[in-house]
Amino acid sequence: MFRKKILLSTVFVISFLGYQKDVEAQANVDKPKEIKENLEKKFANVSPKLLTNNANPLLDFMFTADPTAVEYNGRMYVYATNDHQQYEHVGKDGKNSYEKIRTLVMMSSDDMVNWTYHGFIDTAKLAPWNQNSWAPSITSRLEADGKTHFYLYYSNGGGGTAMLTSTSPVGPWTDPLGKNIVDRSVPGVDCDAPFDPGVVIDDQGTGWLAFGGGTPKTDYMPGISHIVKLGTDMISLAGNVAKIPAPYFFEASELNFMNGTWVYTFNTSWKERTEWPYTNIAKPTVCNMSYMTSKTPLNPDSWKYRDNYFKNAGEDNVGPWTNNHTHLIKFKEKYYLTYHAMYLQDYFGTKGGFRNVGIEEMQVDEANVNISMGKATFEGTSQLSPLNPFVLQQAETTGGTSGQVQFEAVGNVGNMVAKGKADKQCLMVRGADFSNQTPKKFEARVKGKGNIDVYVNNLKGTPLVSLTCDGKEWTSLSKKIKQKIDKAVGNIYFVFDGEDFLFDEWKFIY
């Protein structure tokens, strides 16, 4: 039985990769201007984000894909497939065939350019019965116990959809079912791969789950996209499975709810658009993101195809062509789209199909439920608010790095610390606000033997402040700042080294 599951999943993976266009668009990429300072002379492995001050990808030290997102307490939490786990297994010359991925990545931000890495959800330990963990989808709801509960659904390979729950956006997570919530054994499921879940809670507090994939019945109308109403407990099904007639459907189901309307988004296939019945709507381009709407989601005839809203990143010259997976989220009165593109393959020296999550601001007309066309970029989003350097900040919050920095979990769930190496590495945060206060002291929580040099605005000249640590226990070190800096908003660079050195958190004191 186990061998059959592996073979099935492998078949799905191979078929999906077969669709992937291995077109290298890098030569035509519109790369933004690099900053004047030559950081590549200072550090090994300088990420494109550190060179350009761009916002994409969200994390520049590992591969991530298939994003979903939820808002909680003024932060956007993003969850993703851990492509880096596959990369670590197969190396630079290997291919991203997904079969080694059994963790999900967590990250969050309150300003859209500085992202805090919260580590990963180890589904292999939490749900040892399952095979893989890809393409998560998350939602949350305030429950009767007075706590916000988070419901995270994910692809258990190609065989079904599993789920986890938590009362915190970073865990600890639990597996409430010990089995798939949806698979081919569920009546009404009519697809080879009931995976790539998309969850939403409507204005009545009711949960809905979309899913589907596998072998299409026809090119134009594959007939493999589904939706089902969830039970009040969010871990059971409350009714029959219905189909969504999504044209040229491939995978990557997601759901939104706005103005009394269910919005279904999906990734279209690589197939030629030979059939198209609409005269007032253009054919979706190859492997793009399209959307449909309905006010009665269990009635297949109620679903209306609206348009495509996000072209393939390769079409916009943001890395090679690849599949895509998006999630639309409203955050601080703006709409954002999380997606993936192959931003970092050159940086890591691979062409294996490893992806990274990016984010763009989107224009959405809620009243008429219209999503305007978005575009993948290197620049990404603008910073919503300055970073406050005078409150405690995490070392795992970054806007750019060098050295392909590694992190490890320490202390509370979701807390990571930066690990030193013999060579100097750099962490950068963007848009720190020094306009109202002058820093008089710098403080950092560290462990082991190593050094930190802190620079503001650029890496030229003498560091603003330097710390040296040589201790076996965690300690908070501080040092007075003798230099003056401009009263302005600028980037902060932390240059550190030491093979057993760990860097947890920092702040300035005025």
Image (spheres, rainbow, N blue to C red):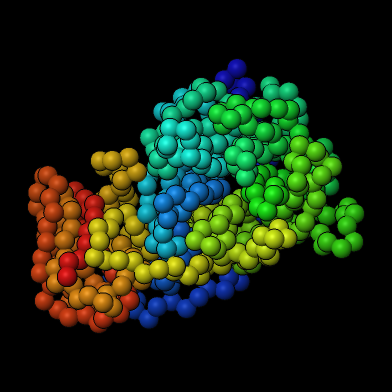
> Quick check: can you spot residue 335?
yes
Rendering quarter of residue 377? bottom right
Q: Position of residue 338 (x, y in %)?
A: 55, 56
- At a point 15% along the width and 56% down the height, the residue shown is 450
> The C terminus lies in which quarter of the figure?
bottom left
Q: Nearer the viewer, residue 145 or 320?
A: 145
Say how many tags the image has: 0
Name the side, left or right, on which 200 lies relative to 109: right
Q: Position of residue 222 (x, y in %)?
A: 80, 41
- At a point 49% along the width and 25% down the height, the residue shown is 176
Q: Nearer the viewer, residue 411 or 4?
A: 411
Image height of 127 relative to 343, above or below: above
> The N terminus lies in which quarter of the figure?
top right
Name the side, left or right, on which 231 lies relative to 270: left
Q: Position of residue 78 (x, y in %)?
A: 48, 50
Q: Position of residue 323 (x, y in %)?
A: 64, 51
Rendering quarter of residue 115? bottom left
- At a point 10% along the width and 69% down the height, the residue shown is 480
